[in-house]
Image: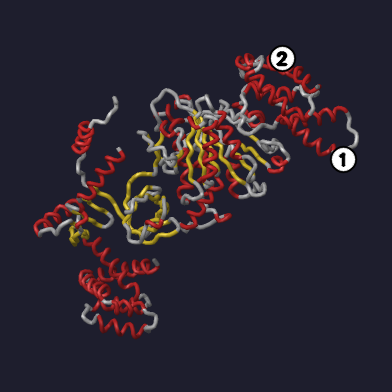
């Protein structure tokens, strides 16, 4: 919980800085790759978290690991580490993404369908959702056969449920509680 | 077999249901459980959730949104929190907690959500009401003026309760608080008052006892028991009182369409017993502490006064425009070693329109109901007392108070003047008159005659030990003996009631003294 709050504050400030320098998109790319690295590497997570590693050593390691990052992103990551908040890095990347989406008017939607959707279906879906949400839509997909048929789209806390499972559930409720 | 099930009809009904059913896409808001424990879940997301909205967990359990914080929502779970786990999705229902209400609930035992727990099948009712309801305003009310007969001599005589009043029953454990409440319910038989008994934090066996007693006296026909027992989670114990009030309000507001009630010409009368509010506030304290609300005095949260005041403020006597229904509340508070200056007792005493004090010393000395006549008051009930009772019992409080003073004083004096001795004798008999058996509520005429005999010196010749028998036999005569006709014709609002009562009591005393002489 504490990490989350700190990450929120840092993300807000970092986004402000990136915005002032007109580099919010570059930083977003940078932080996305950092987040991917965090998610993918258990060793990196250990380095970020471990109290055994000294601050200087950690910064050196991060500098080496993220040498491919743009200058501003790298500076931000190192700054975070210098403040002893390296363990909030993953949370910070998430928060930054939220801020970026808000600014850019982008909604991230996860579509879970019973069967994999074709490209044309996804394109139509994206179009419809964009109208409904009034934002640009970035889709990510998942397959869950327990939905039986149809799909379920989740944008933030909002869920649009067109799955057969839910409809059957509604029918059951109606028949048993009517 | 006229009501045999026809398969084709069933199929037709089902077909119709299916045809009517439209596959509307469900749009809802969700959140994710961050942590769960002690009946509280912290949920991330649910951005639009409203305070005290019902939410549904993926496993089917319901919850109540209690704390809306910056980055999470504190939810009280209605059920076993073991079924809820981290990462589970939580769905908004966009409904404020509400319970089923209506005639179908009478005679049933339900939990805090209105679900039946008596094993007698589902409750089918088209009506429901939100558990939280704003108490009606000043103009929608009327002052209390009709009596709510408890059937207990001391209460109806000294601390009368009116319909729409809140009268607190307060005392230590084992002083007869619940018995008073149950007797009051039994006494409502045949006068159309619907009764609701909310059992909070009690043993299940106690609830069964109450149910059996009420059933034995035919009182379950017009009574609903709302039980949130000690084994139920704290949110249920907290909610039960509000749920019970919602069920009672259905009858009160029957004639008040302007206040969201029914469209009938008249409202009905309801009586609700909260047994007890001490346990309810303890459940609320548990909830509040687990939700990390700052603790105040005795570790209760800051708004514990408001939880009780908004509950008791819902007791009402509605104006004639609103159907003139009423909701009378008898909250119960259990004290520790007669300490009424603890936090919750003082709060509830200040909210209610009077209190009935029960004391274990009196109980142990054989004065039952163990009501302390000196400390018990009713602030509005006087206006609701019948004329007969008001003039008969008018001097009783004073007589009893003088007797207590003299009794203490006379212990030091060896010889007393005749006037003092007479007063002591009268006081002794009046005290005996106050005694009444368990589950034996008395009608107005019985009460008036017994108290009349006491206050008007008819008992002078009757030995103190025979006073209880005198009362019992007088009651029997009035019910089914030679004064049956007098009792049937008795009108407590009649100005000249005293003549009949005087003649009856005199007649009875004469015949009673003959049995004493033997």
Quadrant of the rendering where the C terminus of chain B is positioned: top right
Q: Residues within 10 Å of mark 1 (few under 14, many from 20)?
A: few
Tell me if I can see residue A105 in this picture. no
Q: Would you name the residue on which mark 2 appears?
A: B503
Q: Do residues under tags 1 and 2 come within 8 Å of each other at their CB atoms?
A: no
Residue B382 located left or right of residue A17: right
Q: Quadrant of residue A153?
A: bottom left
Above or below A161: residue B13:
above
**Chain letter belonging to callout 2:** B
Snapshot colouring:
secondary structure
Task: In the rendered structure, find residue A81 and report the number of the disc placed on it.
Answer: none
Quadrant of the rendering where the N terminus of chain B is positioned: top left
Query: Distance between the Cα atoms at labels 1 and 2?
Result: 40 Å
Residue A149 located left or right of residue B381: left
Tell me if I can see residue B105 in this picture. yes
Residue B512 position, x and y percent, is: 75, 20
Q: Would you name the residue on which mark 1 appears?
A: B412
Residue B66 located left or right of residue A173: right
Q: In the image, what residue occupies the spot 68% across and 43% down?
A: B360
**Chain letter belonging to callout 1:** B
Q: Secondary structure at mark 1?
A: loop
């Amino acid at each position: 919980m504490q990490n989350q709050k700190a990450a929120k504050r840092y993300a807000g400030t970092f986004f402000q800085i990136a915005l002032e320098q007109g580099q919010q998109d570059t930083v977003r790319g940078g932080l996305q790759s950092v987040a991917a690295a965090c998610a993918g590497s258990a060793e990196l997570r250990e380095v970020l978290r471990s109290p055994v590693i000294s601050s200087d050593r950690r910064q050196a390691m991060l500098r080496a690991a993220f040498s491919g990052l743009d200058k501003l992103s790298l500076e931000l990551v190192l700054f975070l580490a210098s403040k002893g908040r390296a363990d909030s890095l993953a949370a910070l990347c998430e928060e930054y993404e939220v801020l970026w989406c808000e600014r850019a008017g982008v909604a991230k939607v996860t579509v879970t369908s019973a069967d994999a959707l074709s490209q044309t279906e996804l394109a139509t879906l994206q179009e419809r959702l964009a109208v409904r949400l009034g934002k640009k839509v970035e889709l990510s997909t998942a397959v869950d056969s327990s939905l039986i048929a149809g799909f379920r789209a989740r944008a933030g806390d909002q869920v649009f449920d067109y799955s057969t499972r839910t409809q059957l559930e509604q029918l059951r409720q109606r028949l048993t509680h009517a | 077999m006229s009501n045999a099930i026809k398969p084709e009809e069933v199929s037709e009904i089902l077909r119709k249901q299916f045809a009517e059913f439209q596959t509307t896409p469900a749009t809802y808001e969700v959140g994710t459980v961050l942590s769960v424990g002690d009946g509280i879940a912290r949920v991330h997301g649910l951005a639009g959730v409203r305070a005290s909205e019902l939410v549904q967990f993926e496993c089917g359990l319901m919850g109540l949104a209690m704390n809306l914080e910056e980055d999470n929502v504190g939810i009280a779970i209605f059920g076993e929190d073991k079924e809820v786990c981290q990462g589970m999705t939580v769905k908004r229902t966009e409904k404020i907690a509400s319970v089923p209400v209506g005639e179908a609930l009478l005679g049933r035992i339900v939990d805090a959500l209105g679900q039946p727990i008596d094993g007698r099948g589902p409750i089918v009712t088209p009506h429901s009401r939100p558990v939280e309801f704003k108490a009606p305003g000043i103009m929608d009310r009327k002052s209390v003026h009709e009596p709510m007969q408890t059937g207990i001599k001391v209460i109806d005589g000294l601390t009368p309760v009116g319909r729409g009043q809140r009268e607190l029953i307060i005392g230590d454990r084992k002083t007869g608080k619940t018995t008073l409440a149950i007797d009051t319910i039994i006494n409502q038989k045949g006068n159309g008052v619907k009764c609701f008994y909310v059992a909070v934090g009690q043993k299940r066996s106690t609830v069964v006892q109450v149910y059996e007693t009420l059933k034995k006296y035919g009182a379950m026909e017009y009574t609903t028991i709302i039980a949130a027992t000690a084994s139920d989670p704290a949110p249920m114990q907290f909610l039960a009182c509000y749920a019970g009030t919602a069920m009672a309000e259905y009858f009160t507001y029957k004639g008040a369409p302007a206040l969201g009630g029914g469209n009938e010409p008249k409202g009905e009368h309801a009586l609700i017993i909260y047994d007890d509010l001490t346990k309810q506030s303890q459940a609320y304290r548990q909830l509040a502490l687990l939700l990390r609300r700052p603790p105040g005095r005795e570790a209760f949260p800051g708004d514990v006064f408001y939880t009780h005041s908004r509950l008791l403020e819902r007791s009402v006597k509605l104006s004639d425009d609103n159907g003139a229904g009423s909701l009378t509340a008898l909250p119960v508070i259990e004290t520790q070693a007669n300490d009424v200056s603890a936090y919750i007792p003082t709060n509830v005493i200040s909210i209610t329109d009077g209190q009935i004090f029960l004391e274990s010393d009196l109980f142990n000395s054989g004065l039952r109901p163990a009501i302390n006549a000196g400390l018990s008051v009713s602030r509005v009930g006087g206006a609701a007392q019948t004329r007969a009772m008001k003039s008969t019992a008018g001097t009783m409080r004073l007589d009893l108070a003088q007797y207590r003073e003299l009794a203490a004083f006379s212990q030091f004096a060896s010889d007393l003047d005749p006037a003092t001795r007479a007063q002591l004798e009268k006081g002794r008999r009046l005290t005996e008159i106050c005694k009444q058996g368990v589950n034996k509520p008395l009608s107005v005429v019985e009460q008036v005659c017994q108290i009349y005999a006491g206050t008007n010196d008819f008992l002078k010749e009757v030995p103190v030990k025979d006073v209880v028998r005198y009362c019992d036999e007088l009651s029997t005569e009035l019910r089914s003996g030679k004064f049956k006709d007098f009792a049937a014709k008795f009108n407590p609002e009649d100005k000249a009631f005293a003549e009949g009562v005087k003649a009856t009591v005199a007649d009875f005393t004469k015949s009673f003294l003959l049995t004493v002489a033997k």
